[in-house]
Image (cartoon, rainbow, N blue to C red):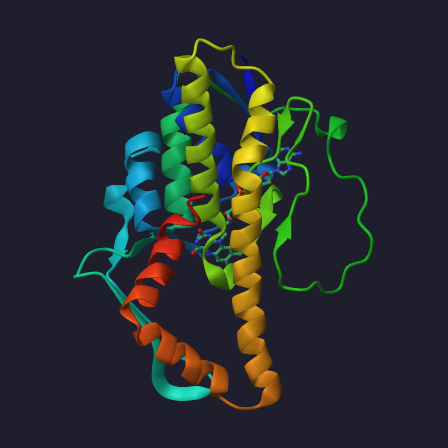
């Protein structure tokens, strides 16, 4: 099976690296923006995703800044934390500079025999030709209803775009990569051909989880917005109470770390 990835953002490069590790050949079609790394941004990656990334994609341990404690405050309950997450001094998630991750992936892909990086492409074939005027847009999630067209599979932010404050966009993508790799392994183990049916299998495995997860993030955002509109702090106080419950606190932590396992 010949694979082609369009775009060299974090998704494209990470996905390419994981597919190459399986012995698959990948061509990556880049545009100029892909090489223009943004030096100001950082990204938070959950602990489960880091374990997977380091093992199955690329060892990035040296680039990580570990976070072992998270405290969440609300505008409406000044100086009082409403949620507190810790895990026996173990890493909850780690921060990494986007450009360092992207350049490390890029450098490593350049050395791969199974990878071809293509720069000089005629983008007219598939570039966006027109946009309507857009002055503002709502900060909420956007999920594709259909994940694929024939043998073309959407991935990363194209598949699901989240509120940036959630810090979960790339985390969702790493979980998607994991799901896709499991499906590939299953096909190969059963002696089946890797063909476009993998796109439908991927959609059936991930779409409901991704939809639930991104709707949950929208819900949290709207939930706290409601409190601001009501001009009181009842919601923050209730969340503080709920967060003190050990079982619920652990459940919140698990979902943020691993997503929905359904
Ligand atoms: C402020 C902010 C903070 C965030 N924090 C976190 C966080 O803490 N944790 C987390 O998990 N996520 C976070 N995210 C989300 C995360 O950054 C994104 O999910 C992730 O970077 C998306 O990567 P991508 O490769 O899918 O998309 P993009 O970064 O958009 O990359 C797509 C690439 O494809 C290229 N491209 C598009 N069309 C073509 C074409 N026709 N031909 C060739 N190339 C093409 C584009 O130029 C682009 O380089 C944050 C997002 C923001 C905005």
Q: Toward the viewer: 125 or 213?
A: 213
Q: Toward the viewer: 135 or 155?
A: 155
Position of the C terminus by quadrant: top left
In the displayed structure, would residue 238 be above or below residue 106? below
- Quarter of the image for residue 127 reads top right
Is residue 154 found left or right of 76 in the rendered image?
Answer: right
Q: Residue at x 53, y 91 (%)?
A: 232
- Quarter of the image for residue 177 reads top left
Q: Position of residue 82 (x, y in %)?
A: 37, 79
Is residue 123 found left or right of 235 in the rendered image?
Answer: right
Marks counted in the figure total: 0
Q: Is residue 16 visible?
A: no
Q: Residue at x 29, y 37 (%)?
A: 54
Q: Position of residue 95 (x, y in %)?
A: 33, 55
In the displayed structure, would residue 32 be above or below residue 82? above
In the displayed structure, would residue 227 be above or below residue 171? below
Q: Is residue 173 visible?
A: yes
Q: Position of residue 214 (x, y in %)?
A: 55, 54
In the orientation shown, which residue stands out farthest toward the left?
88
Q: Residue at x 55, y 74 (%)?
A: 223
In the orientation shown, which residue stands out farthest toward the bottom?
232
In the displayed structure, would residue 26 be above or below residue 37? above
Q: Position of residue 134 (x, y in %)?
A: 77, 59
């Amino acid at each position: 099976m010949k694979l082609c990835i369009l775009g060299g953002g974090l998704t494209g490069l990470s996905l390419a690296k994981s597919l190459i590790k399986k012995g698959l050949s990948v061509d990556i079609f880049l545009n100029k923006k892909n090489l223009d790394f943004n030096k100001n941004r950082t990204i938070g990656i959950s602990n489960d995703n880091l374990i997977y990334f380091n093992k199955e994609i690329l060892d990035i341990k040296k680039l990580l800044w570990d976070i072992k404690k998270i405290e969440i405050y609300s505008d409406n309950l000044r100086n009082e934390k409403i949620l507190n997450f810790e895990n026996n001094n173990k890493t909850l998630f780690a921060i990494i500079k986007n450009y360092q991750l992207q350049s490390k992936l890029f450098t490593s892909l350049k050395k791969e025999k199974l990878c071809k990086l293509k720069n000089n492409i005629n983008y007219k074939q598939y570039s966006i030709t027109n946009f309507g005027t857009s002055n503002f847009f709502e900060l909420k999630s956007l999920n594709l209803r259909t994940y694929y067209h024939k043998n073309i599979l959407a991935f990363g932010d194209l598949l699901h775009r989240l509120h940036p404050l959630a810090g979960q966009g790339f985390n969702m993508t790493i979980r998607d990569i994991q799901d896709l790799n499991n499906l590939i392994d299953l096909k190969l183990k059963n002696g089946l051909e890797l063909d476009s049916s993998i796109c439908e299998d991927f959609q059936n495995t991930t779409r409901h989880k991704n939809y639930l997860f991104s709707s949950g993030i929208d819900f949290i955002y709207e939930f706290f917005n409601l409190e601001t509109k009501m001009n009181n702090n009842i919601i923050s106080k209730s969340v503080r109470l709920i967060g003190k419950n050990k079982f619920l606190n652990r459940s919140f932590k698990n979902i943020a770390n691993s997503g929905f396992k359904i």
